[in-house]
């Protein structure tokens, strides 16, 4: 195995002896069926869970769809190369892989970003792939189905389970099952990570797990390795220079590119939080606060 070639690749997949699972992660299909509601709810709930405990400032989430040239998406060539090598072994996986391959030639692609303000962001990025419960970067970036537990038991009970399995909602919103997260922590350190959800596959005569990570790697003794994040020196779309987290989902599925649906989901899912001034949400040039939410609820353009 060429270790230098692995390190040079922006995306890392873990090698396995052979392919045993030929399906996509079942959670992708569940969140795809939930559509824009699942995506909006999961990402805004994560932002609310990340509220600064010693601050009375309202959590602000800025949701912004846009268009980006595929050359400005970090490491996307590596993802495309893996997708070209995918093989389907049943109707669903064949159909999904064929759909992914059709998008590989797109020059301009749609994306959506969720950026939060007055939140903690992720901690411990410089520690990379650690076993510490305090390093929320490691939990969010590299662990599946695990969430950070608050030391304050009351805050933990009140949380929505951030950084758990719901983060795959962002992968489900992408035609290539790819998402990125930009983080700025309390020290002003800025890093960019990401995940892609494929199927177990063979690439250059080696079998690999289905999940890929946008991350750097350090090779240790005894054939072990450790992931470390990239410092964020990437395109402006992926920048996050104020404390908090920014999710970016390129190759946005068409049914998620729905401003009205996003606004309805916000009003339906976070009505109380907005009324209590715990949350305000910006969707393009529209701002939903406790002072403005009624004009959306009473507007027949959104609700009959």
Image (cartoon, grey):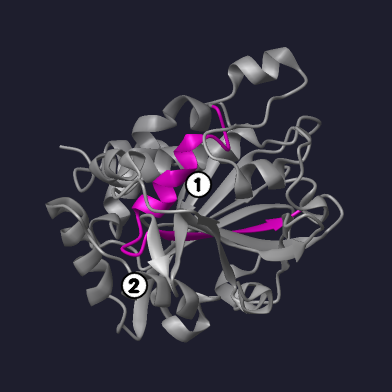
Q: Is residue 94 above or below residue 157?
A: below
**Residue at 67% in and 73% down:** 3
Q: Is residue 235 left or right of residue 296?
A: right
Label 1 packing within 10 angstroms: few (<14), some (14-19), many (20+): many
Which image quarter is the N terminus in?
bottom right
**Residue at 54% in and 76% down:** 75
Q: Can residue 67 be seen from the camera position used here?
A: no
**Residue at 35% in and 51% down:** 172
Q: Nearer the viewer, residue 61 or 99?
A: 99
Q: Nearer the viewer, residue 214 or 264?
A: 214
Q: Can residue 8 be seen from the camera position used here?
A: yes
Q: Is residue 283 above or below residue 39?
A: below
* Residue 44 position in % (x across, y down): 50, 41
How far apart marks 2 and 1 lie (CA) works out to 40 Å
Q: Is residue 213 left or right of residue 218?
A: left
* Residue 275 position in % (x across, y down): 50, 28
**Residue at 58% in and 38% down:** 163
* Residue 179 position in % (x across, y down): 48, 59
Label 2 packing within 10 angstroms: few (<14), some (14-19), many (20+): few
Q: Quadrant of residue 178?
A: bottom left
Magenta stretch contains residue 134: no
Q: Which residues are magenta?
A: 161-185
Q: Mark 2 highlights which residue?
A: 85
Q: Nearer the viewer, residue 290 or 264?
A: 264
Q: Mark 1 highlights which residue?
A: 281
């Amino acid at each position: 195995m060429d270790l230098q070639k692995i390190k040079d690749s922006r995306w890392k997949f873990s090698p396995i002896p052979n392919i045993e699972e030929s399906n996509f992660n079942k959670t992708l299909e569940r969140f795809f069926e939930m559509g824009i509601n699942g995506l909006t709810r999961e990402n805004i709930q994560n932002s609310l869970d990340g509220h600064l405990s010693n601050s009375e400032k309202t959590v602000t989430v800025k949701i912004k769809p846009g268009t980006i040239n595929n050359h400005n998406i970090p490491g996307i060539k590596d993802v495309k190369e893996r997708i070209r090598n995918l093989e389907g072994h049943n109707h669903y996986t064949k159909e999904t892989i064929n759909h992914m391959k059709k998008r590989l030639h797109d020059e301009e692609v749609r994306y959506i970003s969720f950026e939060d303000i007055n939140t903690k962001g992720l901690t411990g990025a410089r520690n990379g792939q650690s076993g510490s419960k305090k390093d929320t970067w490691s939990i969010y970036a590299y662990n599946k189905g695990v969430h950070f537990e608050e030391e304050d038991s009351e805050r933990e009970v009140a949380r929505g389970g951030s950084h758990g399995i719901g983060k795959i909602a962002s992968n489900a919103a992408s035609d290539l099952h790819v998402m990125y997260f930009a983080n700025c922590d309390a020290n002003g350190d800025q890093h960019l990570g990401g995940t892609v959800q494929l199927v177990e596959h063979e690439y250059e005569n080696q079998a690999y797990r289905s999940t890929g990570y946008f991350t750097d790697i350090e090779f240790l003794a005894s054939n072990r390795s450790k992931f470390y994040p990239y410092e964020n020196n990437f395109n402006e779309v992926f920048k996050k220079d104020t404390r908090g987290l920014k999710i970016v989902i390129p190759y946005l599925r068409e049914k998620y590119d729905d401003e009205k649906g996003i606004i309805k989901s916000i009003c339906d899912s976070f009505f109380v939080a907005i009324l209590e001034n715990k949350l305000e949400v910006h969707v393009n040039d529209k701002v939903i606060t406790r002072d403005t939410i009624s004009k959306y609820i009473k507007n027949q353009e959104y609700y009959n």
